[in-house]
Each structure stands twice: as C-alpha cells, then as structure tokens.
Amino acid sequence: MISNFDSPLTRREALQRAALVLGAALSPSLLDGVLHAQPAAVGATPRFLTAQQHATISALAERILPRTDTPGALDAGVPAFVDRMFGEFMPAEEKERLTRGVVAIDTAAVRAHQKPFARLAAAQQDAVLQAAADAAGDDPKSFFHQLKELTIVGYFTAELVGKNVTHYLPIPGPFRGCVPIAETGNVAWTR
C-alpha cells in the first residue's frame, strides 16, 4: 500500500522509519526521550548521573564514536544526552542496567589496568570495551547495546551533526536535477 504523501510525516514516524532502515528497533523510552527532550548542552554538568558515571559514559561514548574528520560523541553532547535520558525518560529497569553496566566497565578497567575506564589510554579503553561487546553478544538487553543505542541516537539527533555531518536542511531549496557533483560538493540534497 502506498502511503499518503499529502499528510505530513511526524517526528515519531521519521525516527521509526530511520530505525527500520538501520535494522534496529528503538526502545520506547529512548524514542520518547528523543521526541520530548531539548538538545543537550555540550559539556553540561550532569544532573542525574554521578560524576564518576558521567566520566565513564563520556569516555565510552567517545570510543564508540570518536572524533575523526567529523565531530565525535563528546563534540555532539552525547554524555549530556545520556544524562538527561537517564534522569527523565528511562524506566527503572533501564536505569538499573545502565548503572550496573558502568560499574562493571570500571571494575573491569581497574582489574586489568588499575585505573577506572575514563583514565585509561585509548588502546586500553578499546580492549575493555571490546571485552564488553564480546560478552554482550547479540543480547539487545545488554548494557553494551543500551549504551551503543544511546550514543548513536544522541549523536545523530544532535544539531551539530545534523548541520555538519548529515547536512540536514529542514526547509530544502528547489530541486535541481542533473547537477555536476563537483558543483555541489556532494551535498546536492541540501542546496
């Protein structure tokens, strides 16, 4: 069945379709949080997580989406997004999973390297994170998958990423077909 193109696409429908394209289902609390939360401030002081939890989540998010030629998770305000999701939108079960997971990551880091995760070198962080990913396997209810989902959604819903990475323009200009790619800078859909 062909959808009605006359009716406007809601933000909820757009996120659900994006998740479908990515091959994942967003958790209801995450979808609700994204729909109602204002953008999180980069470098904001955590309101709901402890300083230690925030430091660990910041380091984890940056290892999941590090800064390269595009902004990283820290640049996009992912830790503040996770803090807000934790405090205002996650049900108790998800909060507990996140809390236990952060403790487990820091415990593994201290056991292996005598320092909490946030104070490890990048290669050491990657080793601890890889061990957590291996332990999680394909379990969508694992801490690793929860944090990965929060990081990716927080990143791709950040204004900085929308403007500078995906080149989203809420009101696009006119359609111009057959434009030489050199003329558009490979972002014809936003010009």
Image (cartoon, rainbow, N blue to C red):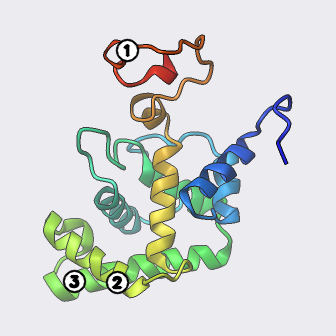
**In the image, residue 39 lies at what x, y percent?**
55, 40
Q: Which mark is residue 110?
A: 3
In this rendering, position of residue 9 left or right of residue 25: right
Q: Position of residue 188 (x, y in %)?
A: 46, 20
| Local crowd size for mark 3, using a 10 Å CA cut-off: few (<14), some (14–19), many (≥20) | some
**How far apart, in angstroms, are the residues tagged by discs 2 and 1?**
45 Å
Q: Secondary structure at mark 2?
A: helix
Q: What's under tag 3, amino acid-wise?
A: Val
Q: Residue furthest front?
A: 178
Separation of residues labelled 3 and 1 (CA atoms): 54 Å
Give me the residue at 51% from left, 57% from top: 83
Circle 3 sits in a helix, a strand or a loop, which is it? helix
Q: How many marks?
A: 3
Q: What's the residue type where badge 2 is placed?
A: Asp
165 to 150, vertically: above or below: above
Q: Earlier in the sequence, mark 2 or mark 3?
A: 3
Q: Nearer the viewer, mark 3 or mark 1?
A: 1
Amino acid at the residue labelled 1:
Pro
Q: Residues within 10 Å of mark 1 (few under 14, many from 20)?
A: few
Element type at marker 1?
Answer: loop
Foreground tag (2 vs 3) = 2
Residue at 49 percent of width and 34 percent of height = 159
Name the quadrant containing residue 91.
bottom right
- Return the residue at label 1: 180
Of residues 129 and 140, which is closer to you in this image?
Answer: 140
Compare marks 2 and 1 and give the one earlier in the sequence. 2
- Badge 2 is on which residue? 134
